[in-house]
Image (cartoon, rainbow, N blue to C red):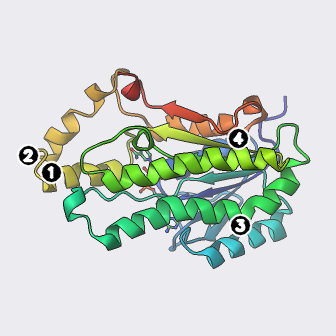
Amino acid sequence: MMAALEGRVALVTGCTGGIGSEICRQLAGAGAIVVGADLPPTPSSWSGAGYLQLDVTDETSWQDAIAAVDRDHGKLDILVHVAGIVVVEKMETTTLAQWRKQMAVNVDGVFLGTKAATALLRRSGDALPHGASVVVISSVAGKIGSPLHVGYCTSKGAATLFVKACAMEFSALGYKVRVNSVHPSGVKTGMVDHILQRIVDNGFAASVEEAAAGLAPAHPIGRMADPIDIAKTVRFLASDEAGYMHGSELIVDGGFTAQ
Ligand SMILES: NC(=O)c1ccc[n+]([C@@H]2O[C@H](COP(=O)([O-])OP(=O)(O)OC[C@H]3O[C@@H](n4cnc5c(N)ncnc54)[C@H](O)[C@@H]3O)[C@@H](O)[C@H]2O)c1
């Protein structure tokens, strides 16, 4: 039986991170030709079909990356926006520079990348039964509020609505490109380690151990997510199995937001 993503070309940003590297593995495992992209230096964690240096906040960097994918592979069937940062800070003490940097990576990055890739995605999508697929890793923070995360929630909320508006516009224009978002809560990566430390720094917990102790029980399913829990969802959205999913939010949070 042919693998679900056999021969599809995928570009995954944030490919050296905890979630991005697992997404690369899952897509490659389903037969995709995966090009990972991240800030320099070259990663040790991902060595698939290719690696591109990409700063998602830079329009020229995106144009170069898409041109390289077109040159090397002639198409782009799947674009996964994983690159992201989190500023864990009280709103009153968040600097404008912190706010803008977070918006630049989490929102501008998604816009610039989708913009740069649309023509190639369209061309590729026309040849697929259910079109090309764009997946944005948003967050439960794009759905609900959280202390110390005002800027992060704002950025993920913006990315979530970008997905819906883009999906509507692509359909109105007749483009065969599906656009969806994925909303994890706590996933065991370096980002969560950073968040826990900042929770302590801000006086919301006495120690990292105390802050961490509340995480698993906060999820009705009884544990935090592993990156593979998120990556499997992305693999699904990228595939023809998700051919009727468009402008949707897939919440993958162990029940966190169902409470
Ligand atoms: N870990 C969680 O609990 C969690 C929960 C919900 C959503 N998310 C989201 O999932 C995504 C991945 O997070 P993660 O946990 O793997 O974090 P991570 O820190 O392990 O990975 C983030 C990656 O983004 C890259 N990146 C940052 N700025 C960039 C830029 N300007 N250009 C290109 N790449 C850049 C980093 O180099 C890193 O490889 C993020 O968008 C994050 O907001 C994470």
The answer to whether residue 194 is left or right of residue 234 is left
Mark 3 lies on a secondary structure that is: helix
Indicate if the residue with disc 4 has its beta carbon within 8 Å of ligand 1.
no
The answer to whether residue 69 is left or right of residue 183 is right
Q: Are marks 2 and 1 in contact (CB under 8 Å)?
A: yes
Mark 2 lies on a secondary structure that is: loop
Name which residue lies at 29% across and 42% down: 146
**Crowdedness of circle 3 by 10 Å Cα count: few (<14), some, many (20+)?**
some
Name which residue lies at 62% across and 55% down: 12
Question: Which residue in the structure is indicated by mark 2?
Answer: 206
The image shows residue 88 at horizontal and vertical percentages of 27, 56
Q: Which residue occupies the foreground of this view, 15 or 90?
A: 90
Label 2 – label 3 distance at C-alpha: 45 Å
Question: Which residue in the structure is indicated by mark 1?
Answer: 200
Question: Which residue in the structure is indicated by mark 4?
Answer: 238
Indicate if the residue with disc 2 has its beta carbon within 8 Å of ligand 1.
no
Label 2 – label 1 distance at C-alpha: 6 Å
Q: How many marks?
A: 4
**Crowdedness of circle 1 by 10 Å Cα count: few (<14), some, many (20+)?**
some
Indicate if the residue with disc 3 has its beta carbon within 8 Å of ligand 1.
no
The image shows residue 229 at horizontal and vertical percentages of 51, 34
Mark 4 lies on a secondary structure that is: helix
**Crowdedness of circle 2 by 10 Å Cα count: few (<14), some, many (20+)?**
few
Name which residue lies at 12% across and 44% down: 205
Residue at the far right: name it: 127
Of tags 4 and 3, the one toward the viewer is 3
Q: Earlier in the sequence, mark 2 or mark 4?
A: 2
The amino acid on which the numbered mark 4 sits, given as a three-letter code, is Ala
Name which residue lies at 67% across and 59% down: 114
Question: Which residue in the structure is indicated by mark 3?
Answer: 116
